[in-house]
Image (cartoon, rainbow, N blue to C red):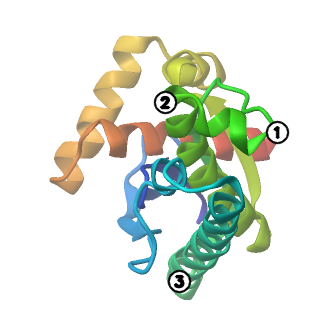
Amino acid sequence: MRIALGFRPHTTWTVAVAVGDPGTSVVERRRIELGDPSLPDQVYHAARELDIEAAADLVRRAEGAVAATAAHGLGEFVADLRAGGHEVTAAGLPTAGAHLPESLGKILASHALLHAAEGDLVRGALIEAASGQGLTVYRAAARDLVAHACAALGYDERTLGRMLDDLGRAIGPPWRRDEKDATLAAWLALKSADR
C-alpha cells in the first residue's frame, strides 16, 4: 500500500502517523524522540542567557543533534513500514507562519522568536530527514491545516472531523489533536504526491 507520513512536532519530540488513502485505517503511529539529553530542551531559551558566540555554538550543536535524532527516528519508522510491505512516498507537516530573522541576536532578543526558532529547528530537522529518505515533503500552515485538507480532499469540515474521529475509535488512544493534525498532514502529502 502507498502511504504517507504526517508529523505534529513539539520541542523535543513529534507525533508521527502513517496513513493510506483518506478514510482508511492508520497504518501505524508513534512518538519519535528528537531531543538530546546532553542539551537543553529549549535551546534558544538557554542560548539567550549566553554571550552571542557561546549561543551560536549551542545552537549549532543543537541543530546537529536534532538532525541526527530525527534522521535516526524517521529512518527506523520508514524501515519498519517498508519491511511491512508499504511504499512510503511522502511526508507532511504543519508549519508556523513566522519568518525568522537571519540574525541570532534578533531572535534571542524576542521571546516570541525564541519559540518560533525552536519550532523551526525541529521542523527543519524533520524535513531534512524525510528528504533524506527520498520522501516528497508537503508543508501547510498549521492554522490552515483543516481548510487545506477540506479543499484538497473534497470533504466539508464536519465530514472530515467524523473521518478523523472514526479513525481514532478504530485505533484507540492516544488520539488527540496531535494525531489528528499529523493525519491531516499525511493525507495532504499523499494527495500532493499524486499530482
The residue at 33%/34% (across/down) is 164
SS state under label 3: helix
Q: Tags 2 and 1 in contact by the CB under 8 Å rule?
A: no
Task: Report the number of numbered marks.
Answer: 3
* Label 1: element kind: loop
Measured along the vertical axis of the image, is residue 149 above or below residue 88?
above
Q: Residues within 10 Å of mark 2 (few under 14, many from 20)?
A: few
Tell me the kind of residue under disc 2: His
Amino acid type at circle 1 is: Glu
Residue at the (70%, 33%) spot, across then down: 106
**Residue 12 to residue 139: above or below:** below
Q: Amino acid at mark 3?
A: Glu
Does residue 161 appear anywhere in the picture? yes
How crowded pointer 3 is (Cα within 10 Å; few <14, some 14-19, many 20+) is rated as: few
Q: Which residue carries the number 1 mark?
A: 102
Label 3 sits on residue: 76
Question: Crowdedness of circle 1 by 10 Å Cα count: few (<14), some, many (20+)?
Answer: few
- Name the secondary structure under disc 2: helix
